[in-house]
Amino acid sequence: MSLTGTDVRNLCLAAFAFAICALLPFGDNGYWLGLGVTIAMFTTLATSWALFSGPTHYISLATAAFFGVGTYVTGLGIDILPFWSLVGLAGLIGAVLAALVGLATLRLSGVYFVIFTLGLAELVRQVITWVQNNTGQKGLYVLTDLDEAGIYWWLLGLAGVVFLAGWLIGRSRLGFALRIIGDDETVAAHSGINTARAKVLLFMVPGAVAAMTGAVLAPRYVYIEPSLAFAPILSFQVVIMALLGGASRLWGPLVGVIPFTFLLEAVSSNFPNQTTLVIGIAFLVIVYLLPNGFVGLLDQILHRVNTREAS
Amino acid sequence: MDILITGILLGGTYALIAMGLNLQYGVARIMNLANGEILVAGGYFAFIAYTAAQLSPILTIFLVAPVAFVLNWLIYRVMLQPLVNRAKNRGQLETDSILSTFGLSFIGVGLMLSFFGGDYFSYSFMAVPVELLGNTYGANRVLSFVMAVLICGALYIWLNRSRSGLSIRAIATAPASARLVGIDVKNLSALAFALGGAVTAVGGALISTYLTLDASTGVVFTLKALIIVIMGGVGDVRGTIIAALLLGILETVVASLLDPGLTLAAAYVMFLGILLFRPQGLFGKKPT
Amino acid sequence: MATPVLSLRGVTKRFGGLVAVNAMDFDVTEREVVGLLGPNGSGKSTTLNLVSGALPLTSGNVSLWGNRISGLPAQAINRKGVSRTFQLVRLLPSMKVRENVMAGAVFGHRRRWGHDARDHAEQLLEKVGLGGKGDMSLGQLTYIDTKRVELARTLASDPKVLLLDEWLAGLNPTELKIGITLIKSLRDEGRTIILVEHVMDAIRSLCDRCVVMAAGTKIAEGTPTQVLSDKEVIRAYLGDDDA
């Protein structure tokens, strides 16, 4: 693998930024750390989401389903296996689940995919509720000695892995194949690309990552029950943050996560009943004002600046 | 046997709801994910009319339909037409309309929560038993079924026998060609969308006579309507009706023999089966 | 006689009640340039679509060096060495010219990557007359240049059979001369080509053999001179009065 000067510089900057972020728990142990955990969580989810949905333009709403599965992996296994292995196991299960969903739906148009993933979290929640009702078990207790700072560092590590994976995929054959598929699927097929397989392979990434994120966050919830673990609203939040920032760049979703997290915090503290409304408005803003997110806006501004300089 | 009949009764109302979405997706090419919220709004309307003004839901329907028609027409003109105009291909329009109607759906839920709160609402209308083929059913369910049949029948006749109905079907089959033979695609698409919304709202008013609703149950109905439309083959009226009846029967069977909590799971399994084995639906054309 | 590179036997395509391609039979031998001709709507492009895997056959089969390729997905057919251009030029808008060409090289049966793919793409750009334009974006290209990019992409996978779907359509007289010269050079390299074309000058100067279709059926086969003076062919193109 050949690294250019710019590549090395970017990698060093990224490593430096991560190091700075890792210092947060030493500065504050309450509100800001909690916010940091939320931002780290959504950054991981949104960036991995955009890895798939950016090039393929398929909107996945399955995040909540994978996340919930991950929390349950920890919930069920916390007394049997060490924490780190549970995270890995969740990743594996998430990847397999994603592969199954992908094989079933990615051969078809994007609309079927959206609808299927829309109902997935609801479906899993119903099934688990039913299982719990019939086995008598209500919820699961997750008791660990992992504190907020520990969870923060886990999430930061996971975010780092996602960024690295995204960077590597972007430079790989798979990344190239997906960009071609996103541009013109007929040309992709006629250039020798197995489009269905490429899409399924890539879809396994956000599936695994969302499951691992859920596994890491389970200790924070302490008591897990289906409506908590499989909250469909999570999928929508991730979609909004990724699209608001812009799914065409690796750092795009990060730009969407930070302001939207603050916005949601502000709204849920001051007008707790209006969060649904805010989410609805956010969707409309994305569609009508920022179709390519903040990244797209930036591109437009730069383009205008460049053409003005050229003329 | 009574499971079968209950299922058919349920399916009839489902058919009405799915018909609304079928008009919107099949003709106007908009996957309206706010469909469920329109249904719930129709239900709220009927609820208020009944509890506040003692107005029978049968009459309320005649109020709900025009209001929903106008509202949906405005939604299409103001929010969705610009997306149709700017979309470079069908895939992009579908993505944009999904995001946009998601936004509408959330705003709809948010508004309903603000005005009505998060409580369930239901009312008792004609909850008297009726004898049918040896078993008793709620008269409200039977009435709802009859109304659904009448409305679906009227729609079917209009679509297949009238000139404007023919134009609508032409747009659903080939919009570009329809334009070439002088059909006003823009206006008729808006009309179809508005009509679809009106039909859904009427379905909501009918279903509220025997089901309990609340501000957030819209999404489940949207999902079911989507499953029915896709199962039946987009744009096809007979397919929608048959798929709706099948879903109604399947749900009732699962609820009676297994567990009421698994109805959505059952619908999903059916959906998955269709996607895997016959993605064009029961009556859709196989893509060449 | 050596096995033909491409063989069509009884190839039929039905769209509902319409028979677009009716029992097409013909062979293409190595290093041959075959012209697929016919009036509009005769099924020429559909036949190409059937060969390249863009559409599934209703019946019949297509073989590459004796091995059946019909029924395989388009990407498998491409990997076996069949490459094509499209009637309406299809390029990749998010990428520059060079990457568009590389797209053809990376996934084909030679699977190039990295510097290898880049150098290969540069060579091809030179060959089609776009040398040095690798960093341009698609919006800056003229119409014939976009066709050149697509041709380069098609050549990038070292195909054994080249399918050109009305590649010379829409060119002005100057561009047409350049285009014909370019395809001539491909022929002189020894490539096997199937050309769907309308431009008569090109057909006479490029094709070794022609197959003429009308309403989905083959009505004539032979050298350009033979088919273009065939009564049936003239009737198909111009109607009864001129036959």
Image (cartoon, rainbow, N blue to C red):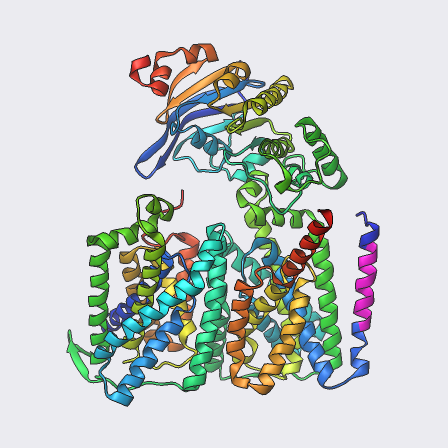
Residue A249: x and y in percent read 67, 58
The quarter holding residue B162 reads bottom left
* Residue C113 forms part of the magenta stretch: no
Residue B223 against residue A174 in the figure, above or below: below
Image quadrant in which you'd find residue C17? top left
Q: How many marks?
A: 0
Residue depicted at 37% across the width and 57% down the height: B28
Which residue is most to the bottom? B52
**Would you say B162 lies left or right of A263 here?**
left
- The image quarter containing residue C99 is top right
Q: Residue at (32%, 35%) from the top-left corner?
A: C18
- Asked whether A23 or B86 is in front, the reply is B86
Q: Quadrant of the C terminus of chain C?
A: top left
**Left or right: residue C132 compared with residue B148:** right
The image shows residue C105, relative to residue B247, as above or below, that is: above
**In this orientation, does residue C67 appear?**
no
Residue A217 point in image, percent of width and height: 66, 77
Residue A79 sits above or below residue C170 on the image: below
Q: Which residues are magenta?
A: A8-20
Instruction: Please check the rendered image and state whether residue A18 is part of the magenta-colored stretch, yes or no.
Output: yes
Whole-percent x, y for residue C220 in the image: 39, 16
Residue C63 lies, in percent from the top left, at 50, 27
Instruction: Please indicate, yes or no, whether residue B89 appears anywhere in the rendered image.
Output: yes
Question: Which secondary structure class fits the magenta region best?
Answer: helix
Which residue shows up at 26% across the image and 76% down it?
B63
- Which residue appears at 51% of the width and 36% of the height? C88
In the displayed structure, C6 sits above or below A272; it is: above
